[in-house]
Amino acid sequence: MQIAKIVGSESHIEYIARVMDTLDVDDPPKPSDYGLGQFVSIKANDLNVIGVISNTELINPNFGLLSLRLASKESNQLFSPDYLHEQGVMIRVLLLGWLENNIGVHKTPLEVLPVQSLVTVLEPEKIQAFHRNNEGKLSVGYYTQVMRVGGLMSNALLNLIIGKLQDFASQDEQKRLALLKQNLNWQETLGSFFGRG
């Protein structure tokens, strides 16, 4: 399912996309389709780059304007349909890697994603494949990258990701994921204790 289009970037691995609305598609995505921690795929030439939604931002140019409203929403639709679409939702996508022969490669893609590249929801089977190495073991090779780049949202984001991975992890893998989660919670507690939370 297509949910957004790339409109810009913050860095080589953090992109900004605008969520599609009724000007783009008849049936726009629902908020649950582009929530925090949603895995996505972006086509970049021959490579399907995999990322995760790391933040959202609401765009509303009219917020704080203290002018009179001369027309209703319905009349604006008639005279200036694009006026209503100045408002929107922007998502930040943190790139994590790609799939190669149905095995996850957790590295920074070298190519720049073109503007207008489509962002689609990653299917559950591809999420699982992306998190398996060539020995079939669970891999979260992007963990430190999310910690470095994710900023204030990194702990919440990684906790969400771990929760999703626990759905298909083996018992051994579940124990390792639980340790990761415990470590994240400890860091968050320590951060708030020293005033960084």
Image (tube, rainbow, N blue to C red):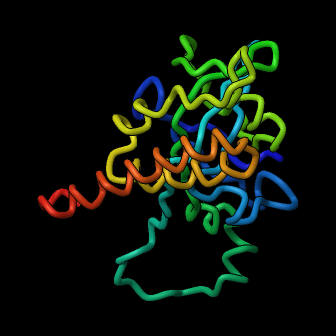
Name the residue at 69% across, 45% down: 171
For the residue pair 101 and 88, the one nearer the viewer reads as 101
Report whether 14 appears left or right of 4. left
Asked if residue 2 is positioned above or below residue 110 in the image, the reply reads below
Q: Quadrant of the C terminus?
A: bottom left
Picture coordinates of residue 137 (x, y %)?
A: 69, 26
For the residue pair 146 and 116, the one nearer the viewer reads as 146
Residue projecting furthest to the right: 26
Picture coordinates of residue 165 (x, y %)?
A: 66, 45
For the residue pair 82 and 128, the one nearer the viewer reads as 128
Asked if residue 197 is positioned above or below residue 46 in the image, the reply reads below
Name the residue at 72% across, 14% down: 134
Name the residue at 16% across, 63% down: 193
Asked if residue 19 is positioned above or below residue 44 in the image, the reply reads below
Picture coordinates of residue 83 (x, y %)?
A: 61, 65
Residue projecting furthest to the left: 194
Q: Which image quadrant for residue 147?
A: top left
For the residue pair 95 and 169, the one nearer the viewer reads as 169
Q: Which image quadrant for residue 100?
A: top right
Name the residue at 73% across, 49% down: 3
